Image (spheres, rainbow, N blue to C red):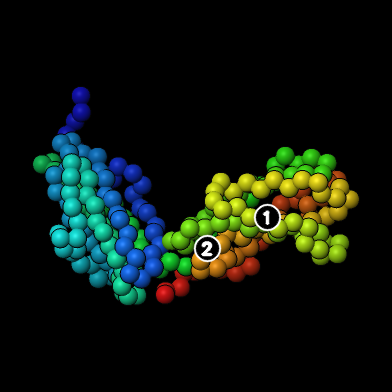
Amino acid sequence: MEYPNAPICATDHEELLGALKHETLALKCEVDASPPADSFHWTFNSSGEQTELPARLHSSERGMSRLNYTPSNDLDYGTISCWGRNSIGTQKSPCIFQIVAAGRPLPLQNCTVTNHTSDALQVECLEGFDGGLPQGFILELVELTNLRLARNLSLARAPVTFTIENLDATATYRMIIFAVNAKGRSEPTIIDDINFKGVAKLTVTIKSDFSFKKL
């Protein structure tokens, strides 16, 4: 038996999205409720000022509302919130969409060296926020003795898993990994002191703080 309840977000409570100016985002606000939500309203908040988004910008169907949103200037980036309503009441905590200017991707996270054999290894990472644009991934392997670039590998999409074979078992390497999109490269993730005399020592270094820049 399903008990009556006011709407709540059906998926993640908050979503981060990047957009270029004049790029239209298709936002979907899906809620769980009993009975199903029969109306929705959307708001936009920038610099502490909240405004109601006109009904003509969004459409509603059973338990869901869709909004097409197009930022045209710097003031159009901010927080969009969606509330559903049914006969029990209005949603208490809105579904939130943080709209930011598209920029460089964030660095890769939790990089781990696996399958470390006598002359090969594999590295796996978790991708960060893509900056609002499609991202790929680059791995540069540097031999530290002579600072020679031993490998330059790329991936077009996630999952981020690089396999490197036929390495010099007597050498020591540094691995530098980037995410990249049309706006540029992320800050590097660095794995130092990779050798084949034992388990790789994992050191992740982010060179500087990263923040989105308005377009």
Label 1 crowd bin: few (<14), some (14–19), many (20+), radius 10 Å: few
Across and down, in percent, residue 182 comes to 51, 66
Residue at image coords 60%, 69%: 208
* As drawn, 37 above or below 43: above
- Amino acid marked by disc 1: Leu
Q: Secondary structure at mark 1?
A: strand
Distance CA(mark 1)–CA(mark 2): 16 Å
Across and down, in percent, residue 180 comes to 56, 62
User: To which quarter of the image does residue 1 belong?
Assistant: top left
Residue 177's disc is none
Tell me how many marks there are: 2
| Left or right, 103 with reference to 115 | left
Q: Considering the image in quadrants, where does the C terminus appear?
A: bottom left
Please name whichever residue, 105 or 203, is drawn nearer the observer in this view of the structure.
Answer: 105
Residue 181's disc is 2
Q: Secondary structure at mark 2?
A: strand
- Amino acid marked by disc 2: Asn
Residue carrying label 1: 153
Please name whichever residue, 53 or 83, is drawn nearer the observer in this view of the structure.
Answer: 53
First in sequence, mark 1 or 2: give its number: 1
Residue at image coords 81%, 59%: 143
Residues marked 1 and 2 touching at CB (< 8 Å) = no
User: To which quarter of the image does residue 10 belong?
Assistant: top left
Extreme residue in the left direction = 87
